[in-house]
Amino acid sequence: GQQVQQSPASLVLQEGENAELQCNFSTSLNSMQWFYQRPGGSLVSLFYNPSGTKHSGRLTSTTVIKERRSSLHISSSQTTDSGTYLCALASGGSNAKLTFGKGTKLSVKS
Amino acid sequence: AQTIHQWPVAEIKAVGSPLSLGCTIKGKSSPNLYWYWQATGGTLQQLFYSITVGQVESVVQLNLSASRPKDDQFILSTEKLLLSHSGFYLCAWSLQVSNERLFFGHGTKLSVL
């Protein structure tokens, strides 16, 4: 089956520092989504990014399909960025079956 | 604006008892709907999805069933809970099943004792 590997498993930053989160996947024809999971558990969609680079405020997502990887860059981190970041692989671009990574737990300290 | 509401927010249930979790989407007709489950400290797993009323596809069953009795409603249920059903359940919707962002409810925390 599909495998989604996220790294690092956890990350501690001082406020203002940048973060680079990685997601690697085992199959080649897919699209990638990034989510932020709040401490309470609910998810917020950050990016739907099948390929290329997308920006949203301080967040940047880059997906390189042929290298089977996607990254999420957080610039100038804030304490409110703390939480868990999940990537999920959609086979053939379909949400009908998403495979999630285990997540990167980010803690930003003031 | 579209809203997604999950109920209940939390449940504490006994092993062997029945369960029904619900999800309602307002402000969007014919949404694609999804159920996910996450064991405490575990990886989020997709359970079911539905493209239209009355049609539900299983991804991972876990001795649970799902139904879509109305266009805006998605129900997750079982007649007999297991300890392994404990965890966090999330409902989500998207406009189309492919190439679309997902929007999630706030989730239901289930504790089976």
Image (spheres, helix red, strand yellow):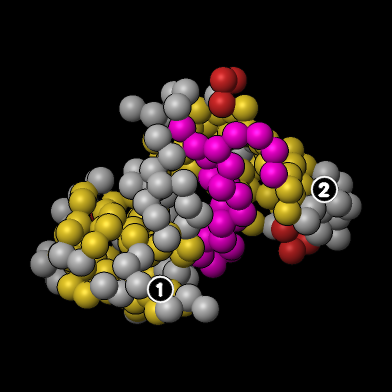
Mark 2 crowd level (few <14, some 14–19, many ≥20, 10 Å Cα): some
Q: In this view, does A24 lie to the left or right of A54?
A: left
Which span of residues is magenta-colored? Answer: A30-54
What subunit carries mark 1?
B
Q: Can residue A46 be seen in this view?
A: yes
Q: Which residue is nearer to you in this view: B60 or A12?
A: B60
Q: In this view, does B64 lie above or below A49?
A: below
Examine the structure image and report whether residue A66 is included in the region drawn in magenta: no
User: Mark 2 highlights which residue?
Assistant: A75
Percent position (x, y) of residue A51? 60, 34
Residue at 20% across, 66% down: B53
Question: What residue is drawn where x is 86% and y is 51%?
Answer: A76
On the image, which quarter does residue A27 sit in?
Answer: top left
Looking at the rendered structure, the kind of residue marked 1 is: Lys
Residue denoted by label 1: B28
Q: Magenta includes A50?
A: yes
**Viewer-side residue, A36 vs B57:** B57
- Up/down of A20 relative to B53, above or below: above
Element under disc 2: loop
**The C terminus of chain B sits in image quarter:** bottom left
Q: Which residue lies furthest to the right in this view?
A: A16
Q: Is the magenta stretch mostly helix, strand or loop?
A: strand
- Image-based side of A93 in relation to A11, left or right: left
